[in-house]
Amino acid sequence: MTAPTATKQRKPVVLLRPVPGDSVIHRLWAGTKLIVVAGIGVMLTFYPGWVPIALVAALIMTTAWLAHIPRSALPSIPRWLWIVLFIGGATATFAGGGPVIDLGSVEVGLGGLVTFLRITAVSIVLLGLGALVSWTTNVAEIAPAVATLGRPLRPLRIPVDDWAVTLALALRAFPMLIDEFRVLYAARRLRPKQVPTTRRARRRRWAIEIVDIISAGITVALRRADEMGDAITARGGAGQISAAPSRPRRADWVALSISILLCAVAVTLELTVLGTL
Amino acid sequence: MTVTEASAPRRVGSLQPVELAQASVMAALCAATAIIAVVVPFAAGVSLLGTVPMGLLAYRYRLRVLIAATVAGAVIAFLIAGMGGFMTVVNCAYIGGLTGIVKRRGRGLPTVFGAALVAGALFGGATVAALAILTRLRHLLFESVTANINGLAAVIARIPDMEPFAERLKHDFATMLDYWPYLFFCSSVLSIVMVTFIGWWALSRVMRRLLGVPDVHKLQSSTDTGQIAPVPARLHDVRFRYPKADHDALGPVSLNVELGEHLAVTGANGSGKTTLMLMLAGREPTSGTIDRPGAVGLGELGGTAVIMQHPESQVLGTRVADDVVWGLPPGKTTDVHQLLTEVGLDGLAERDTGGLSGGELQRLAVAAALAREPSLLIADEVTSMVDQDGRDSLMSVLSGLTQHHRMSLVHITHYNDEADAADRAIKLTGNGGAADNTEMVATAAAPAATVPMGHHSDEPVLELKGVGHEYASGTPWATTALRDINFAVHEGDGVLIHGLNGSGKSTLAWIMAGLTVPTAGSCLLDGAPVSDQVGGVAISFQAARLQLMRSRVDLEVASAAGFSVRDHGRVVEALATVGLDHGLANRRIDQLSGGQMRRVVLAGLLARSPRVLILDEPLAGLDAASQRGLLRLLVDLRRRADLTVVVISHDFSGLEELCPRILHLHDGALTAPTVAGGMS
């Protein structure tokens, strides 16, 4: 589905839809991708140093290349984000601190800027990982993978199967709800704007507006849920959610080993020779 | 059970069908708000709204439902918006769950405040503990913010007389960070308490509004145990009355469903056809008896299967093959391809269900029903929301079923020709019909003409020049929805834009209303781009409920038309234009029938004298009587008020008089236009 765009001709963010085509990465089990993303996410929150960032960035580039993801898949970066980044970078540069470089007569301390760049890099790398999963995974494979991944939790009486079914149904309902929100938003745009005169009236108007919007959204959702409830009842309750088996294959073990190796190397380097303090 | 009653019996064990459906839809809703909050700039406040669905869930169902919804919503938000989305959903569930549970227990503000303090303290404690463990991340975060603050201070210090202030800023910030555990703890408590109060307020207001929302959930899981054998079924003097209703919805009815027969049930709206389906599917009648050799076994292997009216909402899988097996007991193997071939969907197993047409979805529902090898299959008005092609192919699938399978087929329909295919037909007579539709038989008073009659200028009102539209332009997902569309709509025209699912007709409607800017060409209203004059072209969407935002009819009409709420006279006048009685002005929106909703939308739109009125599938989902009434009204409006009408539809039936001019849209392009009759 496509997020609404403010201006025309800008490349939109396309979500939960794989890039058309088939590749090694497309064929990987969805569970593998979820494990790798979660694992690397955890590593980066513990060790957000330059070495782990660089290694993960390299992994992302390689995967994107293997998956034949064209550069055009990237959404356009809105101008406000550039401005925010520029202001952030500028103020951080003014803070100075080592290392220092000489630019003719001016000495510039890059310490602040480097810190700022590092945190920006961490965010970009994390976003890139998530994007890769969404660009190479069919939505239908996610819930069965979660069910398989959660199997070890079953003996602890954690209702993993309920969660997987709920997730599958939520993913099914999600695009329908998004479409309904689009209509809701369009219907609002079509209405005449009423300009309240006093500030109090404006505040009241605002509150009424919010309650109206939520009520409309919830009413629609409730109706959808009622119908879905009937449909589930007609199928005799929950059971199978996928026609194809969902389990790792050989390629998945390879991918997992590579990721574990990468994390181990990153952490080792970070803790020994190439650490970022 | 209505929306605002907490369901009384607390169940244990796995989630029930209703709980699953509610959890997943609310999870999707919460995930959607969380994603908007994270992805759209300056929309973080939207995340507060995500507490309402979760609150409602916690109020109506047990904790297990809330947790399942949290997991599902958090995974979706994580997949789309990363960690930020994940945390937003978890927070919404945390706070929404809190308010919902307090509300269920019937407690008030003091309890909410206390609970929020405790919850805030727990959350703050967890945050501090996490940051204490993640030393490197903490240092990075703190250093980065410190660098920004110090840089800012350095800039400020350059301004004359501001140096002390800059020093102060630097110093105070450093001190604050020294005490970071207190800082994070206190701000957690404060923000959780604040958000809880906002969530509580919103939940209370919304719940008051939802009081009148009718519960359309009707099927019940079968409770009878033992050998499954739903046929032959013998109904004797069966009557049914819905709880709190004042008349019987069905009966008395006596009929038999024999082994292996194809039985058609016909009858007018309100004769109780759907209620009969519920009886056959296992719901207990109010009086009378139903004899069966064994249990009903709704949805179970060898039991009863039901196919319902709405194509979209009974599909549960995101992939065609997954939907066929959805809900089958674990371990049961199914020949998906053979089933899909039988219903004519061979080769589509890997397709997304989202891209199927109405007819294809209904045939998929037949395949899913057949996967259960049912002894009794009930098809309840399955063709009523499908176009003619879809109807024909669906009927050919249905009529062959009893020959190829050992089962009985009960086909409920309001089309007589469909009943002819059956071995035997039964006509339900009902008892007076639904009062809802009789009160809105066309009594439309002619509205005052908004444009002088007979003045047909040559200048078109709406003109499309080389319009093309591509979604997701420039990305690998780019899809062309429309190409090179040229036509003009003149004053007083009635145009039908006909096309099947996926032909791009909805996109065209949005472009004509100015809601979408086409990627190529231009759409002009009175010579200027229509996208600069949103509101000049009125559009009535297929889902009328989405267009009704206020709680009551008079508030809604006033808001949509731009009247003052107190201007009762104009509201009544607007309602009269669409043939609605003034007594309806105080009715709550959720108590209106489908046809009435559509008319209320029209009342609001017409009161602004739009240049053009676009109707997207105006007849979909309405029963035959409402369809006739609405058509009569629209024809009248076009004739007498010289209204310019554009109808977007997949069906022709009955639209000839309203739309003498027909444009065919096929795969995003217009094919040869036809004129069905002379211009009025």
Image (spheres, rainbow, N blue to C red):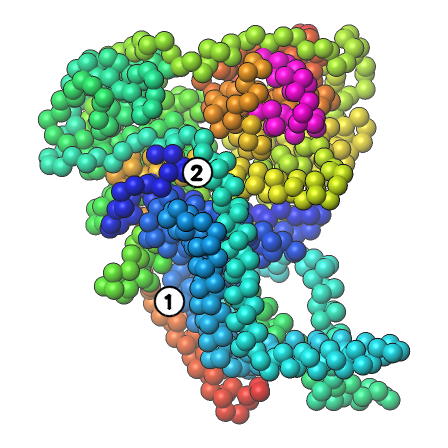
Chain on which label 1 sits: A
Is there any visible trace of residue A39 in the rendered image?
Answer: yes
Q: What is the three-letter code of the residue carrying label 1?
A: Asp
Of tags 2 and 1, the one toward the viewer is 2
Viewer-nearest residue: B635 or A33: B635
Q: Main secondary structure of the magenta part?
A: helix
Residue with the mark numbered 2 = A222
Determine the residue positioned at 37% across, 15% down. B270
Residue found farthest to the front: B110
Classify the position of the C terminus of chain B by image quarter: top right
Q: Quadrant of residue A249?
A: bottom left
Q: Secondary structure at mark 1?
A: helix
Numbered disc 2: secondary structure: helix
On the image, the x and y values in percent for residue B555 come to 61, 28
Q: Chain of mark 2?
A: A
Under mark 2, the amino acid is Leu
In the depicted structure, whether residue B486 falls above or below residue A252: above
x then y, percent, for residue B446: 66, 8
Res. B404 in view:
no
Q: Label 2, label 1: how many angstroms apart (C-alpha)? A: 40 Å
Mark 1, residue position = A252
Residue B127 point in image, percent of width and height: 49, 71
CA neighbours of label 2 inside 10 A, class few (<14), some (14 to 19), many (20+): many
Q: Residue at x 76, y 82 (%)?
A: B167
